[in-house]
Image (tube, rainbow, N blue to C red):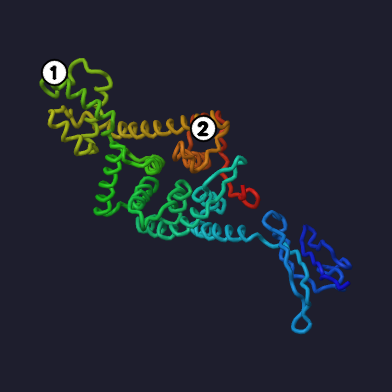
């Protein structure tokens, strides 16, 4: 007939009282022991609003000390903060605090962390954070800020750049030479930075030409191509279309006997437009050396510099915009295909069938929030039921999904 032990239930709820099996209703009073000492309250009133972050833990505790220690332990039920939730919040808070120190709004800092660290989006539209990605972002943040400061970017400029391009946090600028050049290219494209030194400018020119060559040969990975497209990278003029037009020009050159005569007669419109583009780029100093040497050997007619001076900027801008529009339309077709199969537009970040599509969707949401997404694109995405709401990190039960 000896008592097995006392049962103490420590809990918390909105009115700040205690609820459980207590002898006289007092906080922490034991059952069958005449009232044990009150247990420490582990849930504060400020945290009681989100009880999904807490768990109930059963503990066996021997009461008393020395010769007065109980032989049999007593069972205690304690509500405490989930360990995984604490670790996750402390890790993301470190990144968010660093971003807020750049002058970034707290909600923007949270959105950047979600975009850089999420690996999947649930059917409820909540982003699940990946521990490995979060650790990578934490390690890469300080080297990235040092590089951007060396390029002459201010704190406010760095904050604006990360809001528009959160993927810059995804790789190391110290261990990955390609990514270091990519960050430099993105900063120069998005921000008004001081003119880089001659050494840096030459290094970036060679790197850009290498990306163009790799893309033409099909040796550029899908991830790198997607990253470059998102910053509006100029893929140059010597693509598959350029090679096809060059072959047509060679055929006309052989039949006509001279470069000027080849373009003087009845020339297909596509070839004439291509030739005019080559003339504009030549006089603007933007034509690659390889293209200029191949055309010069065939006695290509470069035209008059005065003729193209006025339309130089307009033509170059048109080329860049047309290429960016083609890349955007390709992604839209992929999103339509995904929508036809799944019935929604919640593309996972690591969707293997269309690499980069999930990141592209995140980019559209940031552009929409910044007011930089054209109305026609907003309309096309809206017709698919695309959600422009920025995703929030999942907590509690949603993270377990």
* Label 2 neighbour load within 10 Å: few <14, some 14-19, many 20+: some
Q: Residue furthest left?
A: 257
- SS of the residue at dot 2? helix
* Res 326 → quadrant: top left
Sequence-wise, the earlier of marks 2 and 1 is: 1
Q: Decide: is 109 above or below 313.
A: below
Looking at the image, residue 173 sits to the left or right of residue 201; the answer is right
Could you say which is closer to the camera, residue 371 or residue 202?
202
* Res 58 → quadrant: bottom right
Question: Which residue lies under the disc numbered 2?
Answer: 338
For image coordinates 44% across by 52% down, the residue present is 169
Question: Which residue lies under the disc numbered 1?
Answer: 255
* Viewport quadrant of the N terminus: bottom right
Q: Decide: is 346 above or below 177.
A: above
Could you say which is closer to the camera, residue 196 or residue 95?
95
Looking at the image, residue 22 sits to the left or right of residue 261; the answer is right
Q: Decide: is 82 above or below 288.
A: below
Place of residue 60 in the rendered image (x, y in percent of width and height, measured from the top left):
74, 69
Q: CA distance from mark 2 to mark 1?
A: 49 Å
For image coordinates 79% across by 82% down, the residue present is 68
């Amino acid at each position: 007939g000896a008592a097995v032990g006392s049962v103490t239930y420590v809990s918390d709820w909105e009115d700040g009282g205690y609820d459980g099996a207590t002898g006289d209703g007092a906080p922490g009073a034991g059952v069958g022991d005449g009232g044990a000492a009150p247990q420490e309250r582990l849930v504060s009133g400020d945290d009681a609003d989100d009880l999904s972050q807490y768990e109930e833990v059963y503990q066996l505790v021997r009461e008393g000390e020395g010769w007065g220690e109980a032989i049999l332990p007593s069972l205690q039920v304690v509500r405490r903060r989930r360990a995984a939730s604490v670790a996750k919040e402390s890790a993301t808070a470190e990144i968010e605090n660093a971003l807020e120190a750049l002058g970034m709004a707290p909600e923007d800092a949270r959105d950047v962390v979600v975009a850089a660290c999420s690996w999947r989006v649930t059917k409820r539209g909540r982003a699940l954070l990946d521990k490995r990605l979060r650790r990578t972002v934490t390690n890469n943040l300080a080297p990235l800020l040092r590089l951007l400061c060396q390029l002459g970017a201010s704190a406010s400029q760095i904050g604006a750049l990360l809001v528009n391009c959160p993927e810059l946090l995804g790789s190391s600028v110290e261990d990955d030479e390609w990514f270091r050049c990519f960050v430099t290219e993105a900063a120069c494209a998005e921000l008004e930075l001081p003119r880089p030194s001659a050494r840096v400018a030459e290094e970036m020119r060679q790197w850009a030409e290498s990306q163009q060559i790799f893309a033409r040969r099909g040796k550029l990975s899908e991830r790198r191509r997607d990253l470059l497209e998102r910053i509006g990278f100029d893929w140059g003029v010597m693509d598959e279309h350029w090679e096809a037009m060059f072959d047509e020009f060679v055929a006309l050159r052989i039949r006509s006997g001279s470069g000027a005569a080849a373009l003087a007669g009845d020339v297909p419109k596509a070839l004439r437009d291509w030739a005019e583009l080559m003339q504009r780029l030549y006089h603007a100093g933007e034509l690659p050396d390889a293209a200029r040497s191949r055309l010069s050997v065939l006695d290509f007619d470069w035209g008059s510099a005065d003729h193209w001076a006025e339309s130089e900027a307009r033509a170059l801008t048109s080329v860049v915009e047309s290429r960016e529009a083609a890349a955007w339309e390709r992604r839209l077709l992929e999103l339509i295909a995904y929508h036809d199969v799944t019935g929604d537009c919640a593309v996972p970040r690591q969707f293997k069938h269309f690499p980069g599509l999930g990141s592209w969707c995140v980019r559209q949401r940031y552009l929409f929030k910044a007011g930089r997404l054209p109305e026609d694109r907003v309309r096309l995405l809206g017709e698919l039921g695309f959600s422009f709401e920025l995703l929030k990190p999942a907590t509690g039960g949603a993270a377990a999904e």
